[in-house]
Amino acid sequence: MPEITPRGLTGLAFGGDYNPEQWPEAVWEEDVRLMREAGVTLVSVGIFSWALLEPAPGAHDFGWLDRSLDLLHDAGIRVDLGTPTVVPPAWFYRAHPDALPVTAEGVRLAFGSRGAICHSNPAYRAAAADITTRLAERYGDHPALAMWHVHNEYGVPVSACYCDTCAAHFRRWLERTYGGVDAVNEAWGTAFWGQRYASLDEIDPPRATPTVGNPAQALDYRRFADATMRENFTAERDILHRLSPGVPVTTNFMTALSQCDSVDYWAWGREVDLVTNDHYLITDGRRTHVNLAMAADLTRSVAGGAPWLLLEHSTSGVNWQPRNPAKAPGQMARNSLAHVARGSDGAMFFQWRQSRRGAEKFHSAMLPHGGTETRVFREVTELGAAVQSLASVRGTRTEADAAVLWDWQSWWAQNLDWRPSQDHDARERADAFYEALYDHHLTVDFARPEGDLSRYPLVVVPALYLMTEAAGDSLRRYAEGGGTLVVSYFSGIVDEHDAVHEGPYPGALRDVLGLTVEEFSPLLEGERVRLTGPGGAELQADVWTEFVVPRGAETVWTYADGPAAGRPAVTRHRLGEGTAWYVSTRLGTDGLATVLARAAEDAGISPRDDLPHDVEVVRRSGDSGRFLFAINHSGADAKVPLETPGTELLTGERAAGRLAVPAGAVRVVRLDG
Ligand code: GAL
């Protein structure tokens, strides 16, 4: 992917969503003055302002936006200009009530929040194209314009609509994808439960049914819904490219949030000029900085390894979780700079000034209700200066040690109903493997199952239930060529239509793993099993066991008890120049770390277990140099060995030998040479 950056920015981006329309114009001067004080260089404007830009059908009011953009430009602040197509005005829905989306249960959602859109609706499509055209014509060469921000977070809050317009659009999609009803019947296995269709006209969206519906239909509907949103994105993007040439177009992703699993970002990454991401800490008791690192690594991977931009995160608490703790002192900077370490060319927030009204008034912002005499504003200002001192990092790429396979479509398939155990959660496995790699201080790229993996010594496959034969072949070639694979249970089971691969499990991976699985035997709630292994080392597991039959693989850990007692639990298969490990049960992070340490030996990589726990060390490199980021998430001061001396950019001090990273602090060293 070409590296395309916001126009006119020389350093890293720093700023946030800016909603001047929520404030009297008298406040705008103060906004701009304080933005400069805080080191803001880029703001996202106009994302939700369609009703203000077009107060009545065909009647436009661009005056306020003209004045706001000019004010920002005069202050040297660049603009990421939104197309406001995520919230059409109320008058639009009065004229086109069928543009409101319908749920699978047949409920038409109402206007009055945001994102109430049927993406198949022709009136919506025409109106979105019209407002986008008018904005592009008016602002396409505005001197403040750095980039375009289309819509907002496609896929949330509505991931799919089930109305009649969508039904017709779905049938056209099926026609294009399959060529006719026979191929659909075959792919969906409609012989089961007498679901056979005589014509595409008989097919509807997977609306609420008495019991479980056809899984392949449900899976295809997710693909259709995703493709339909992408049609609308590319339509707007193409207008912007035509009328505002040379200005990058993005839409903000939410790569790793399980709340936004409805978008196949591998496909979207190819459509945007610049990948941007929103990330919020989910306070569910787990280590939030690990989830953050994973989101950032996934975003970079969607960008093909190129720099990307963190377009939203929060300065402190959010307001949409059951409990919304404030960030601890220093946590915001650690969060922001961890994204930068993992490839973001900046750190942006939702939002600049905390709203007084509306649904998000208790969401933190850069300028809180309390004003400038607040901890948050002081920390924002300090962070603005820190970000400025990292300008030379811009454009460099994060170095990765290993890859984790990731596939949204497999995730969709895995989450359909009636699986061997409701306790198995594919996302949980991805998180757990990621956390084990993180704790070994290995930096991870995410990779597509069918992509070229040859540059990675170690590839981890957390729970890739849906895997095409081509993906299985690619993994076999990877291992035979000298790679080391680690595969978890319930991987390689079905093809792209959610049909079980022919023959014993795991169909797509039998050869590479050197085994078959005769039967799954998930555990009951709370049940645990023990595994015994090399030198008597014991591991604990839960949720899943199965009856593995080695066919070339050696057994490394064996079930000591439970339904699979005496059978292989963790195996290792040598093939060609490489090795494939298989983990047939749910190990905790410690157990996974133990297995991964063995696999890392096969891969010839050394986990950096000399580095302190919860001290994140990541490197970026490129034409402007090599940078070591050390982020201390722990409560203890730490030392990080430096391979060469260098200059610490946040303090300007020289650094050599063992770099001191105080508890909670961040250090960024530009390494010499
Ligand atoms: C994002 C969204 C923003 C704001 C933010 C609050 O998902 O794009 O507009 O709502 O969440 O956390």
Image: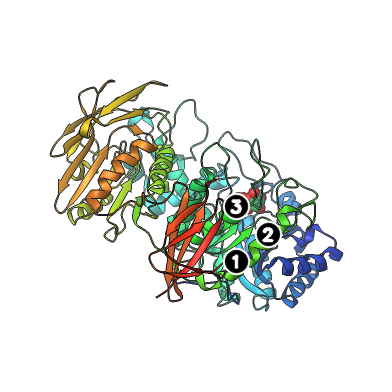
Of residue 377 and residue 266, the one placed in the foreground of this image is 377
Residue pointed to by mark 1: 387
The residue that disc 3 covers is 121
Question: In the picture shown, does residue 152 fall above or below 240?
Answer: above
Coordinates of residue 121 in the picture (x, y in percent): 60, 52
Q: Please provide percent x and percent y for residue 612.
A: 43, 49
| Residue at which label 2 appears | 380
The type of residue carrying mark 2 is Val
* Residue 598 pos. (x, y %): 26, 44
Quarter that holds the N terminus: bottom left
Q: Nearer the viewer's eye, disc 1 or disc 3?
A: 1
Q: CA distance from mark 3 to mark 2?
A: 42 Å
- Amino acid type, mark 1: Val
Name the quadrant of the C terminus. Answer: bottom left
| Res 511 → quadrant | top left
Q: Secondary structure at mark 3?
A: loop
